[in-house]
Image: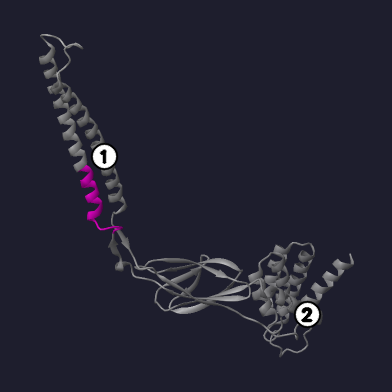
Amino acid sequence: MKAMRGLVIALVLAGVPRVHADDKPWVTGVTEQAKADAKVLLDRGNAKFVERDYVSALELYKQAVAKWDHPAIRFNMVRCLIQLDRTVEANENLTLALKYGAAPLEEAVYREALTYQKLLANEVGTVRVRCEQAGVKITLDGELLVDCPGEQERRVKPGRHQLVGAKAGFLTKTADVFVIGGGQEQVAVSLAPMERGVVVHRWPTWMPWVVVGAGLTLTSVGGLIEYQSFKTMDDYDRALVAACVNTGCTPERPVPDHVRDLKDTAKLQNAIAIGALTVGVATVITGGVLVYMNRARTVYPTAEVVPLGATVSLNARF
């Protein structure tokens, strides 16, 4: 209970700034009614914060800031944003909360704000993008960052972020940007026109067709040899009949040598034909694959996304 009571006191102190002079920047131009309305919203936000309903508390603090943009109310927003793990927004609002230094804040609250400033320093990085081409739109993580020509920076969480540059008639470029906590990644973007595409092949266009032609030639030769094998076997059958039809062919009267040679020749021709056909068909298939792999494709110059180097800011406070 003591800890919770201390939290409530801290919130109230942060929510009720000491204001005595209307010439202070955070007071100038703010009506008494606006101050009163902001105080009501602030008190409601504090109640929600104590209940750990940080989403509702943050919304009420935003409404209060709309009435009176006071550093103390901003700092209460920082507390909520940290609890919601929205460190980038927390860092941005903390910068606004400390805009006027310690003057608008209670001493304890100011010390707490400085502590948060140190803690958030390594939880946020910066992406700075430069583009000189008119009409190019650059987005970071899906949100517009730069409408070129121009230069812009955005604070982000450490890690990988997606940068996209696009323009009609130009190649869209997507690149990953890696940001380290407390550092700055600088990038220059330049897109290439689409009409610069060049038609290219993996190999000279004649090469795959030579392979296909060689395969077809082998297949044709194999077919011719197979045809000759059939003819030789027919010759053997006729010669066998002629030699054995009258006297018969027995161990005592074997088949004449010239007839047996015809059969052996037919077998040899058949074996050569099968080999030639097998190699020929395989070569034709290989050539067809090479023709497909060598199909024309258009290559465009890649758009340039040039990292200019990561810079890490060091602060003497650390």
Q: Write down the residue under mark 2.
A: 111
Relative to the observer, which residue lies in front, 262 or 183?
A: 262
Asked which quadrant contains residue 251, the reply is top left
Give percent across and percent down for residue 230: 16, 26
Q: Write down the residue under mark 1.
A: 281
Residue at point 60%, 73% (across, down): 125
Q: CA distance from mark 1 to mark 2?
A: 83 Å
Give percent across and percent down for residue 85: 68, 65
**Part of the protein shown in magenta:** 201-216
Give percent across and percent down for residue 291: 27, 50
Rate crowding at label 2 as few (under 14), some (14 to 19) or many (20 or more) other CA atoms within 10 Å. Answer: few
Q: Main secondary structure of the magenta part?
A: helix
Give percent across and percent down for residue 142: 51, 65
| Closer to the eye: label 1 or 2 | 1
In the rendered image, the quadrant that contains the N terminus is bottom right
Report if residue 200 is visible in the image. yes
Q: Secondary structure at mark 1?
A: helix
